Each structure stands twice: as C-alpha cells, then as structure tokens.
Amino acid sequence: MAIAIEVENGLLSLRIERPAKKNALTQEMYIEMTEALQEAEDNQLIRVVLITGCGDSFTSGNDLGDFIAAASSQGGEVRAPLDFLQTLAAFPKPIVVAVNGLAIGIGTSMLLHCDYVLASGAATFQMPFVKLGLVPEGATSLLIPQLMGQRLAFELLVLGESISAERAQQLGLVNQVVEPELLDMVTMELVERLLSLPPEAVQISKQMLKVSQQQAISAVIEAEGVAFKERLFSTEANEALTAFMEKRPPVFR
C-alpha cells in the first residue's frame, strides 16, 4: 500500500509512501486517504489527523498517467481526487501537515484545507497547472487570491513559480518552518498540544472558522474539476505533457 495508515493515542497518521515516483498520487491512493478520513470522522477516539510524505517529497502531485487513464476510461468520471479534496475541506477535526520536500500541484493546494502546516527548510512548493496546459484545482482559484491578493495569486497559479518554505510561510501557506532534522520532533510536539485540548471545543472552533464559505469551497472544487478534466485533453496539455516526457521546451501556437 502506498498510503501507510496508523492510529495511535488519538492520532490518525496518513503517510504517503511512493518514493520511486516522488509520492505521486494515484486514484487508489486518493481513495485510501478519503476512506481513512471518513472513518476517522465518526471515530470518537481519533482527535487529530497528521499527513506526511516519505523520502525527499511530500507529494509531487497527481500521477498524470494514472489520471489520464482514469479520465479516458468508460464514463470518464474522475471522482477520486475531488472526493478527497471535498472530504479534506469538510473534515471536522484538526489536520496537521508536515511537508518534508517537494509539494507540487495538489501537494500545495491541499494545504489550504488543513489547519496547521509545518515545513522543512528544504521543502519547495509549486502549482504548475498552467505550465502543463491545465487550470487551478482544489479551490485554489478561490482561496489563493483571498490569502494573498490577485497579483501574488497570479504569480503562483498562472506563472506557476516554485517557492521556498520561507516564502511559503511569508505568503501564509505555511505556519512554521523548521530545520529538516527537527521536522518530526516539532510536528509531534504540535500534535501533542492539540491532543491536550478539549476536543469538542476544538472542533466547534474549527467549524466556526470555516463555515462561512464551506459551500463556496465545495462548489469551486467541483467547477475546477470539470475545467481540469476538459483541459487534460486539450492540444496545449498534450504538447506540455509530451514535451515534459521528451525533456524539451514546449511549443505553444
């Protein structure tokens, strides 16, 4: 299994373990994480969720080959990433993320739906959707402009610039940046702090912080998903992905 799932002392840990592919996410991996979160929502013993990656990556984003195969199949309905994002966005308990390395595409956009993000000083963040002939996903077109304004949102979502952990912290994507060798220790200290708080008060407070635009976020996730799938089969996306595989600059006309 490419998602290591562990429950211990009130903590659900989801660890992305596909190092040979930089922890790129397949449909099956999305389903595993979604099911684990849905079970945790109803489990009174689970009070905090922690999402991490292994090796030198948090996740390099969607496994595009797997995604294209799913979108090309009979029916062509690609629900797994959308269901994961919807579940993450509506999850009532605290979600902590520790970003140890690459956070590409959904590896960055999913952070917007989590509650506390720690990053190694060696981590990098990028949403290169447009570079691949695609469009933003994960409600980034709504939440990134709200977080940092339209011009910086343009820089991240249209130019698709890669940014450091320190820059991500300045922009509000990350709460805390720590030395790589301290990431696990500092993360667990934060988890213990959350576990020590009264759980009902924590959940009610989280709901109060998010409820005002929960419906809007859900709607945007779906709308972006439709546009993303359409763009996946566009001429521009085909050229961008072909150029990527051939290790050459893409040519757009």
Image (cartoon, helix red, strand yellow):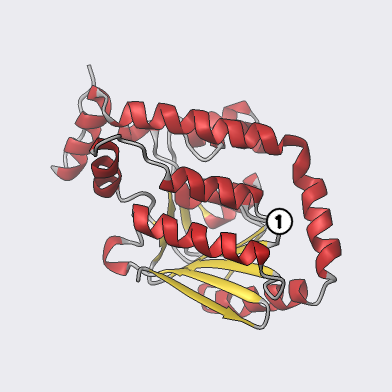
Q: Nearer the viewer, residue 251 or 141?
A: 141
Say left or right for 233 vs 176. Answer: left
Measuring 55% from the left and 72% from the top, which residue is drawn there?
Answer: 13
Which residue type does callout 1 highlight? Pro
Does residue 164 lie above or below 238 as drawn?
A: below
Q: Residue at x 53, y 47 (%)?
A: 85
Write the residue at 63% across / 45% down: 171
Front-most of residues 207 and 172: 207
User: Up-down: is 116 above or below 87?
Assistant: below
Q: Residue furthest bottom?
A: 9
Q: Position of residue 194 (x, y in %)?
A: 75, 71
Q: Quadrant of the C terminus?
A: top left
Q: Give the residue displayed 33% in from the left and 27% down from the top.
A: 231
Number of marks: 1
The relative height of residue 145 versus residue 181 in the rendered view (above or below) is: above
The image quarter in which residue 185 lies: bottom right
Q: Position of residue 237 (x, y in %)?
A: 27, 30
The quadrant holding residue 31 is: bottom left
Q: Residue 166: x percent and y percent? A: 58, 55
Q: Nearer the viewer, residue 3 or 54?
A: 3
Q: Label 1: few (<14), some or many (≥20) within 10 Å? A: some
Q: Is residue 46 left or right of residue 125?
A: right
Report the quarter where the N terminus lies.
bottom left
Please state the horizontal and vertical placement of residue 212, each as a whole percent of the image.
Answer: 78, 37
- Dot 1 falls on a residue whose secondary structure is loop
**Circle 1 residue:** 92
> Left or right: 37 with respect to 146?
left
Can residue 220 be seen here? The reply is: yes
Q: Which residue, as the protein is rendered here, is positioned at the far left? A: 246
Viewer can see residue 102: no
